[in-house]
Amino acid sequence: MTKQYIILHDPARCIKCYACEVACKQWHGIKAGPVKLRRVEEKTTGKFPDVKRVFKSVSCMHCIKPRCIEACTQGAITKRAEDGIVIVDVTKCSGCRSCFEACPIQAPQFQEDGTMQKCDMCLERLEKGQEPFCITACPTRALQWGSIDQFSAR
């Protein structure tokens, strides 16, 4: 593998505006409803008056060793050698949900027809030299995209 692309989230910058969620849904043509390839979560800790809220934008992590690939009985999920992006071939997906069960963050999402869809880092945009749409939409730059080498060099 030549590169491993990742999306990093900085919870200190996230304001829970949902721009990343909405942008993702719009780019991928996902109608209103429970299917979210990127979701914003909230964690609350402490007791009043010392309550803290932290927001986190979550999507497929495009893991180094994806459990979803191992779990897929149909061979529908693969990892691109050139950039580490984990993609799904919906024509091979049987909708068995084994990938969902294997994923530690439940990134795979299932459409009404039963086929799985997940974040592909807006592959069509990347191929045109553009960033993933969630990155572009984030007003506070809480999301960043690049190669793992780029971020580890900081």
Image (spheres, helix red, strand yellow):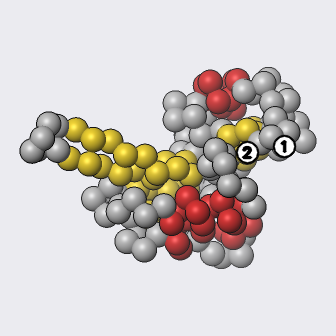
Disc 2 on helix, strand or loop?
Answer: strand
Q: How many angstroms separate mark 2 from mark 1 (CA)? A: 7 Å
Q: Residues within 10 Å of mark 2 (few under 14, many from 20)?
A: many
| Location of the C terminus (image quadrant) | bottom left
Where is residue 73, by image quadrant?
Answer: top right
Residue 90 picture location, percent across and down? 84, 43
> Is 49 on the left-hand or right-hand side of 43?
left
Residue 98 or residue 152, whichever sits in front: 98
Instruction: Let me know if residue 77 appears in the view.
Output: yes
Instruction: Let me know if residue 78 appears in the view.
Output: no
Q: Residue at x 68, y 29 (%)?
A: 99
Residue 31 picture location, percent across and down? 73, 56
Disc 1 on helix, strand or loop?
Answer: loop
Where is residue 108, by image quadrant?
Answer: top right
> Is 21 on the left-hand or right-hand side of 55?
right
Q: Residues within 10 Å of mark 1 (few under 14, many from 20)?
A: some
Q: Residue at x 69, y 70 (%)?
A: 125
- Mark number for residue 117? 2
Residue 88 or residue 64, whichever sits in front: 88
Q: Is residue 7 above or below residue 44?
A: below
Amino acid type, callout 1: Val
Residue 83 picture location, percent across and down? 63, 55
Q: Mark 1 — residue?
A: 90
Amino acid type, callout 2: Gln
Q: Earlier in the sequence, mark 2 or mark 1?
A: 1
Residue 97 or residue 33, whichever sits in front: 33
Say whether marks 2 and 1 touch (CB < 8 Å). Answer: yes
Q: How many callouts does the rendering have?
A: 2
Q: Residue at x 10, y 44 (%)?
A: 50
Residue 61 picture location, percent across and down? 53, 45
Q: Residue at x 51, y 66 (%)?
A: 19
